[in-house]
Image: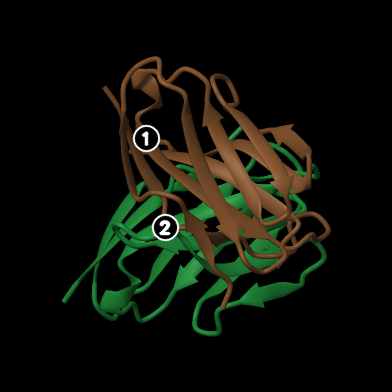
Chain colours: A green, B brown
Amino acid sequence: QQPVQSPQAVILREGEDAVINCSSSKALYSVHWYRQKHGEAPVFLMILLKGGEQKGHEKISASFNEKKQQSSLYLTASQLSYSGTYFCGTERGDDKIIFGKGTRLHILP
Amino acid sequence: DVKVTQSSRYLVKRTGEKVFLECVQDMDHENMFWYRQDPGLGLRLIYFSYDVKMKEKGDIPEGYSVSREKKERFSLILESASTNQTSMYLCASSPLGWRGSYEQYFGPGTRLTVT
């Protein structure tokens, strides 16, 4: 079952902040975040592991609430280059990464 | 840089044809994945392989099979293509790690149209 992402889409002005949420009905071992620009492959942003370890992008932050099976991606002082579709991927203990339906982010100048 | 390549960017096939989508990675990764991407549905896992000749079904394996004879190559096979398999197909690879602890590297995708 796919994790649920919210919101489905968001429009911001350059410099504004955004939060993208990802939740699962199953226990999670890790949460991945990727960004995909139109016509391109998804690109890795961050991994959050059970137990608190994080790997990824210096300018993007995220949280992982293991008890609630939720993760949030925080985009602060958004830039035009942040536009794209953001996917969270969850690993539920079987080594497969299952992705959500995506959140479309559009940044206006 | 890790490179994941897919045999075609665009492919047009007829209903009933057997279709092969090839994926090659050059970083000696153990894990390889096939996803399909459709508008509004995100990335859905078709098959996963964690070693040569090993495979596991993802969420939507019906109508597909896979082959992994060499570590660097993972093929997706549509035995008899149907119009509902028209989609973007993405291949990815990652090192072997505990519980998804390594990022996935994606190929550029193959846009398959079945007419």
Quarter that holds the C terminus of chain B = top left
Residue A26, numbered label: none
Provide the chain ID for the residue under circle 1: B
Looking at the image, residue B14 lies above or below residue B112: above
Q: Is residue A3 visible?
A: no
Q: Is residue B34 visible?
A: yes
Q: Which residue is mark 1?
A: B87
Residue B30 lies, in percent from the top left, at 76, 57
Q: Residues within 10 Å of mark 1 (few under 14, many from 20)?
A: some
Residue B57 lies, in percent from the top left, at 69, 30
Q: Which residue is mark 2?
A: B108
**Towards the viewer: A44 or A106:** A44
Give the amino acid at mark 2: Pro
Which of the marked residues, 1 or 2, is nearer the chain's N terminus?
A: 1
**Towards the viewer: A59 or B6:** B6
On the same chain, marks 1 and 2? The answer is yes
Gap in Å between the C-alphas at discs 1 and 2?
Answer: 14 Å
Residue placed at 71% from the left, 65% from the top?
B102
Residue A108, image quadrant = bottom left
Relative horizontal placement of residue A63, taking residue A7 as reference (left or right):
right
Residue A88 lies, in percent from the top left, at 54, 54
Residue placed at 67% from the left, 57% from the top?
B72
Provide the chain ID for the residue under circle 2: B
Residue placed at 74% from the left, 34% from the top?
B56
Residue A66, image quadrant = bottom right
Which element type, helix, strand or loop, lies under badge 1?
strand
**Towards the viewer: B2 or A7:** B2
